[in-house]
Amino acid sequence: MAILITGGAGYIGSHTCVELLNAGYEIVVLDNFINSKPEAIKRITEITGCTFKFYYNDLLDKKSLEEIFLENKIEAVIHFAGLKAVGESVYIPLQYYHNNILSTLVLCETMKKYNVKKLVFSSSATVYGAPEKCPISENSPLRALNPYGRTKLMIEEILQDLYVSDTNWSISILRYFNPIGAHESGQIGEDPHGVPNNLMPYIAQVAIGKLKELNVFGDQYSTNDGTGVRDYIHVVDLALGHLRALEKVTYSTGIEVYNLGTGKGYSVLEMISAFEIASGKKIPYKIVDPRPGDVAVCYADPVKAMESLGWIAKKGINEMCEDAWRWQNKNKNGYEKNLHIESPHFIPSEDFLIRSK
């Protein structure tokens, strides 16, 4: 029996693939490479020494998705696939609603058809919008403020309705806070297209010399140093959270929501200082006006995940920065080598030969 991972070549997906393979799971990976590169698949095999089936398909293609379920004994699904840039979603909202929601509907319909009712869904702390207080618990008010966040919230509601209609489903909804860092090998990490939208890859690209300086949005917040505070979580800790959630859905039914965060907040200036220590590089920055909608402080209450999943984030800010720098330093231009995919179905081998069915 295999675990289907949609979006498995992406930042969080690739790290989760590594942890699943290391834990002895059989995996089947699907990705369309809109937000990822084929090179990530090759590197997963290099890190783990394991091969697995990969499908170069789009979730919106229902016929191709059904072929995956027909060709493999799928036991459960971890669903990462989706468009993910908050800023971009404001400018192309229809594309976000169409892609993220419809692809999830196609996935759930196919799972239902083939009686696969165990799902771990990749949601986001953006569903909380501007929190009234911190730490943020799973019961905090939900008020997504952008199309990306609203797609996550709508999908959560769809999954709630799905479970009400059929209580044989077992669903874990994971609300991530701010994933950063990379695998300790430096082989896989965050490789954003164009100018990064998130703080850590932007800092890393300034450190490596790709970008001139960092813009710090506001220094007048009610925090220790005036800059915004966020809950940064190491991507490997996040990946391990998916393993615990997968174990939960495998042996139970129901639908539950879990925050995946550290429960600690770090300011922008604290992150800059930690990265300077990790990299030995000076990070030039300038203070600019705050962005509309940004909040002063946002961090998780992770107690439910600890009590129900037996999961806790273990890596601190120093490891996050050290691993992020190792990835950036070894891969100045990210996954620069872009492998050509000729077949929609192949099994990555050690030399990454593409083999058709």
Image (cartoon, rainbow, N blue to C red):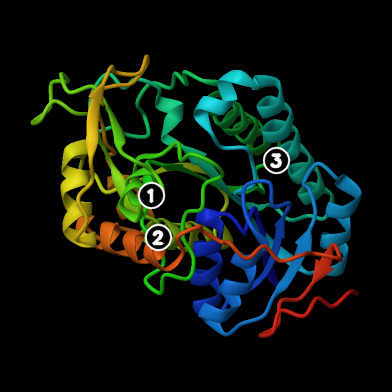
Q: Is the Cβ of the residue at disc 2 closer than 8 Å to that at disc 1? A: yes
Instruction: From the image, tell me which residue sits under label 2.
Output: 328
- Give how far apart the Cα atoms at labels 2 and 3 are: 45 Å
State the mark number for residue 205.
1
For image coordinates 64% across by 38% down, the residue present is: 163
Of the 4 image quadrants, the one containing the C terminus is bottom right
Query: Considering only vertical position in the picture, is 190 above or below 105?
Result: below
In which quarter of the view is residue 88 placed? Answer: top right
x and y, in percent, of residue 258 in the image: 41, 44
Res 99 label: none
- First in sequence: mark 2 vs mark 1: 1
Callout 1 amino acid: Gln
From where the camera sits, is residue 314 visible? no
What crowding class fits label 3: few (fewer than 14 Cα within 10 Å), some (14-19), or many (20 or more)?
A: few
Measure how far apart labels 2 and 1 are at the Cα level.
7 Å
Q: Give me the C-alpha separation between circle 1 and circle 3.
A: 47 Å
Question: For the residues carrying marks 1 and 3, which lies nearer the camera in this image?
Answer: 1
Query: What residue is shown with label 3?
Result: 166
| In this rendering, position of residue 316 left or right of residue 17 | left
Q: Residue furthest top?
A: 292
Q: Residue at x 82, y 61 (%)?
A: 69
Q: If you read the primary sequence from the N terminus, does the residue marked by circle 1 or circle 3 appear first?
A: 3
Q: Quadrant of residue 2?
A: bottom right
Instruction: Inspect the image, locate mark 2, and give the three-letter code of the amino acid beneath it.
Output: Gln
Residue 356 vs 152, above or below: the answer is: below
- Neighbourhood count class around disc 1 (C-alpha, 10 Å): few under 14, some 14–19, many 20 upward: many
